[in-house]
């Protein structure tokens, strides 16, 4: 591995400059205006896979954005690692909140990243982390140390729900046949506290529309006598949580998998400081479901959040109007054993049932996905733990994350594969927010640690 690390050391500038090129292409999957850039990014990934030494590299078109596939099969008797990542990014808006432009990467020192961090949309989620895999593969090829087979599947629609990848996985089971999935799209506790994500939440995302009168009205002439859809929507949304912050939708908790006291105790061992958490967010109090800690509320419990809400007049100054319609986008994070489809249906039924007669409500489900848990008692986790321990000089802590990567549950369902979530980001890297960044240390630590996973996994499965 010394040889490998020397090789990485000699090429650091080159790797960074390639990552910068990748970050300059605005591959925003949600916004059709970026369609060409998304395609350009797929081409970029394809080119880098080829130059790294992958074979059978191809761009697979879908009904949406393309999927990039490539592989290197050394010997059918060796284990095969399926590397998954995404090259699409979240929208960068609002642009004015960025200190430097989102698609013009720049390295700056931060408190958490004294060795510098790369500021750009997608730096951490997931271009920077996905690119570590291409470079790690390249290094193994160049130093003649690839120990097993590898397949890459890099998609362009993770940030919009991976719907087309789902179809692709269902239709290409033979192509994707592997022993384990390896993903870097999560984080670690801190650069001196390595961890491995062993749980992801699922998701049910819905949009609601509340319609009152058939047109916008003068709020003086009609106000008080006609239901205001925004007022009604606020009431309805407020009623979705009770005083203890439980979700009031009938049946919402029916399938929630209980976490044993023993497991909760184990989880509570991961370092967490409530005071630092609050001061970082400039809040004086945290808030959530009675009976659970902050960490538990944000990982092992299901939630319901309004992501956006609009209607009426939101322009400059004041306009007196009683709006005809009000809208909201609502996400529910789900935990193991809950079904995203069932939850979307329960939500719809409940929301229609609580609507007063004065309005009409319409619920439209968006994307969904199931939660995932990674066992810690199989060779995949053992190899990941050994790799992290070697890379960071400290044994990693298993932690359950609150985020979602819907395809992980699907890999298990369709391909029968477990996924190792070997992420290197920090919670403070501002993914999805303005000023997203990724530590230079983390980028190279990932490139260094990934080959160790390959090595240990192969050794444990020979
Ligand atoms: N990489 C994130 C998920 C993530 C981040 C998991 C940090 C754990 C820790 C992924 O790109 C993401 O943002 N997923 C979406 C879900 C998707 C359906 C839009 C999410 O979690 O909101
Ligand atoms: Mn991601
Ligand atoms: Mn994301």
Image (tube, rainbow, N blue to C red):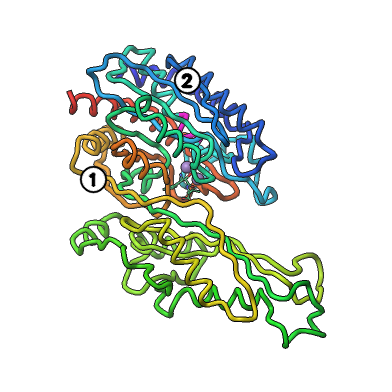
Question: 337 or 184, which is in the foreground?
Answer: 337
The magenta segment is 127-131
- Is residue 385 highlighted in magenta? no
Q: Residues within 10 Å of mark 2 (few under 14, many from 20)?
A: many
Q: Residues within 10 Å of mark 1 (few under 14, many from 20)?
A: some
The residue that label 1 is drawn on is: 375
Q: Quadrant of the C terminus?
A: top left
Q: Is residue 29 left or right of residue 96?
A: left
Q: Position of residue 399 (x, y in %)?
A: 31, 50
Quick one: SS at disc 2?
helix
Pointer 1 or 2: first along the chain: 2
Circle number at residue 49: 2
- Does the magenta stretch mainly form a helix, a strand or a loop? helix
Residue 224: % across, % down: 72, 87
Placement of 204 over or under 15, stated as above or below: below
Give the percent coordinates (x, y) of residue 26.
63, 35
């Amino acid at each position: 591995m010394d040889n490998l690390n020397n090789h990485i050391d000699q090429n650091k500038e080159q790797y960074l400059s390639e990552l910068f090129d990748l970050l300059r292409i605005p591959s925003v999957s949600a916004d059709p205006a970026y369609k060409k850039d998304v395609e350009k990014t797929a081409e970029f990934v394809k080119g880098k896979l080829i130059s790294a030494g992958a074979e059978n590299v191809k761009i697979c078109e879908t009904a949406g954005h393309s999927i990039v596939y490539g592989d290197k099969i050394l010997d059918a008797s060796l284990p095969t690692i399926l590397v998954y990542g995404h090259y699409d990014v979240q929208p960068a808006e609002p642009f004015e909140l960025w200190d430097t432009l989102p698609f013009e990467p720049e390295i700056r020192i931060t408190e958490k990243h004294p060795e510098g961090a790369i500021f750009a949309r997608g730096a951490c989620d997931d271009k920077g982390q996905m690119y570590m895999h291409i470079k790690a593969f390249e290094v193994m090829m160049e130093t003649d140390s690839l120990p097993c087979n590898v397949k890459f599947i890099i998609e362009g629609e993770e940030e919009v729900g991976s719907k087309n990848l789902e179809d692709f996985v269902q239709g290409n089971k033979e192509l994707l046949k592997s022993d384990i999935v390896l993903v870097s799209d999560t984080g670690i506790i801190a650069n001196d506290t390595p961890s491995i994500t062993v749980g992801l939440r699922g998701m049910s995302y819905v949009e609601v529309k509340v319609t009152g009168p058939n047109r916008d009205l003068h709020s003086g002439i009609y106000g008080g006598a006609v239901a205001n859809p925004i007022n009604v929507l606020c009431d309805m949304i407020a009623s979705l949580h009770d005083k203890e912050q439980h979700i009031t939708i009938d049946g919402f908790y029916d399938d929630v998998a209980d976490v044993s006291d023993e497991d909760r105790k184990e989880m509570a061992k991961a370092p967490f400081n409530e005071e630092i958490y609050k001061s970082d967010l400039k809040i004086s109090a945290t808030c959530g479901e009675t009976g659970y800690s902050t960490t538990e509320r944000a990982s092992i419990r299901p939630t319901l959040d309004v992501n956006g809400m609009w209607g009426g007049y939101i322009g400059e100054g004041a306009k007196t109007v009683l709006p005809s319609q009000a809208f909201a986008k609502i996400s529910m994070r789900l935990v193991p054993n809950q079904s995203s489809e069932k939850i979307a249906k329960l939500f719809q039924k409940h929301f229609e049932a609580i609507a007063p007669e004065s309005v009409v409500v319409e619920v439209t489900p968006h994307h969904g996905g199931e939660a995932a848990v990674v066992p810690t008692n199989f060779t995949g986790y053992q190899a990941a733990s050994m790799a992290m321990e070697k890379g960071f000089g400290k044994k990693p802590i298993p932690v359950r994350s609150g985020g979602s990567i819907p395809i992980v549950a699907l890999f298990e369902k369709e391909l029968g594969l477990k996924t190792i979530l070997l992420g290197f980001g920090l919670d403070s890297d501002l993914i999805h927010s303005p000023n997203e960044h990724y530590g230079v240390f983390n980028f190279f630590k990932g490139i260094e640690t990934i080959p160790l996973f390959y090595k240990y996994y192969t050794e444990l499965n020979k």
